[in-house]
Image (cartoon, rainbow, N blue to C red):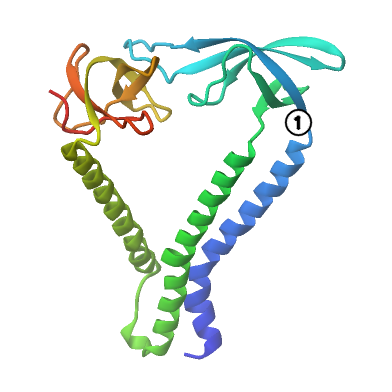
């Protein structure tokens, strides 16, 4: 097998999906940049914030939403509009000033990403690219070169087998990280670093994907927090059931360990 045959039969089919992904990503960035030009920067003041908790026909709460009543100046006139806030964290308060993008035709708003958030997003993208490059791209090229140097009759592999071979490291990394985090959480619970909190199951809520989870309402530092309980197979939660949660005193975060319900 010469170099040209090895490239078109082994290396090219392996790297072509990544090239297609990169092309689509660049096209998406260009389209998004053109669309962003239609959004105008404005400064809006929050008049009121309202929680929206809708229930389905079974009485299960839909994903929580927050409606903001805003006032802002547009073309020299004060405009009052309501807007469903796109987050359930870092909520503004009445009287806060928000930097937003406003689309006059759609009458819709977008949050302006802060510098700190941009840095986090860039870091997450860099990590993702490194994972793709190290775990998938580099091994695929090395594997193709290895097959090129072996006799042809010894490496008759289907394309699906090659993809399955490179998907295995991702699964291993996912399982290792999951086990490590679970053991670290249990170790902190057993050492007393996390403070136990007794709470009752308040109800059930759907997430954005339609899965139903039980949740508790806990008050920490004067603020009420909704804590989602993990799904434990073969065990069901009931409203009013007591569960044990764990508070991290350093950052105020609350954790629900899978086997802490009673």
In the image, what residue occupies the spot 40% across and 77% down? 143
In the image, what residue occupies the spot 22% across and 40% down? 188
Q: Position of residue 1 (x, y in %)?
A: 47, 90
Tag 1, which secondary structure? loop
Q: Nearer the viewer, residue 177 or 92?
A: 92
Left-right relation of 231 to 23: left
Q: Position of residue 224 (x, y in %)?
A: 38, 15
Few, some or many residues within 10 Å of mark 1 (<14, 14–19, 20+): some
Left-right relation of 100 to 68: right
* Residue named by callout 1: 39
Left-right relation of 169 to 24: left
Disc count in the image? 1
In the image, what residue occupies the spot 49% across and 55% down? 127
Q: Position of residue 86 (x, y in %)?
A: 56, 25
In the rendered view, tell whether residue 99 sits above or below residue 135. above
Q: Nearer the viewer, residue 22 or 231?
A: 231
In the rendered view, tell whether residue 141 sits above or below residue 65. below
Q: Nearer the viewer, residue 79 or 97?
A: 97
In the image, what residue occupies the spot 25% across and 33% down? 194
In the rendered view, tell whether residue 5 sits above or below residue 120. below
> Where is residue 113, by image quadrant?
top right
> Where is residue 60, by image quadrant?
top left
Say which quadrant the C terminus sits in. Answer: top left
């Amino acid at each position: 097998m010469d170099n040209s045959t090895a490239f078109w039969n082994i290396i090219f089919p392996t790297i072509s999906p990544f090239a297609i992904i990169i092309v689509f990503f660049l096209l998406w960035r260009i389209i998004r940049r053109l669309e962003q030009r239609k959004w105008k920067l404005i400064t809006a003041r929050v008049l009121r914030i309202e929680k929206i908790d809708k229930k389905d026909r079974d009485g299960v709460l839909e994903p929580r939403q927050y409606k903001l009543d805003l006032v802002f100046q547009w073309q020299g006139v004060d405009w009052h509009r309501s807007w469903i806030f796109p987050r359930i964290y870092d909520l503004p308060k009445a009287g806060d000033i928000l930097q937003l993008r406003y689309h006059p035709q759609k009458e819709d708003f977008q949050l302006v990403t802060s510098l700190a958030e941009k840095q986090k997003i860039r870091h997450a993208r860099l990590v993702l690219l490194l994972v793709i490059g190290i775990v998938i791209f580099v091994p695929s090229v090395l594997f193709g070169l290895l097959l090129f140097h072996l006799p042809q009759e010894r490496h008759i592999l289907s394309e699906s087998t090659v993809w399955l071979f490179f998907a295995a490291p991702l699964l291993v990394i996912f399982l290792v990280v999951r086990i490590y985090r679970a053991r670290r959480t249990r170790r902190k619970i057993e050492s007393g670093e996390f403070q136990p909190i007794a709470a009752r199951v308040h109800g059930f809520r759907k997430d954005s994907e339609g899965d139903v989870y039980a949740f508790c309402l806990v008050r920490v530092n004067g603020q009420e927090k909704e804590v989602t309980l993990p799904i434990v197979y073969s065990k069901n939660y009931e409203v009013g059931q007591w569960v044990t949660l764990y508070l991290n005193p350093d950052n105020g975060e609350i954790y629900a360990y899978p086997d802490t319900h009673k």
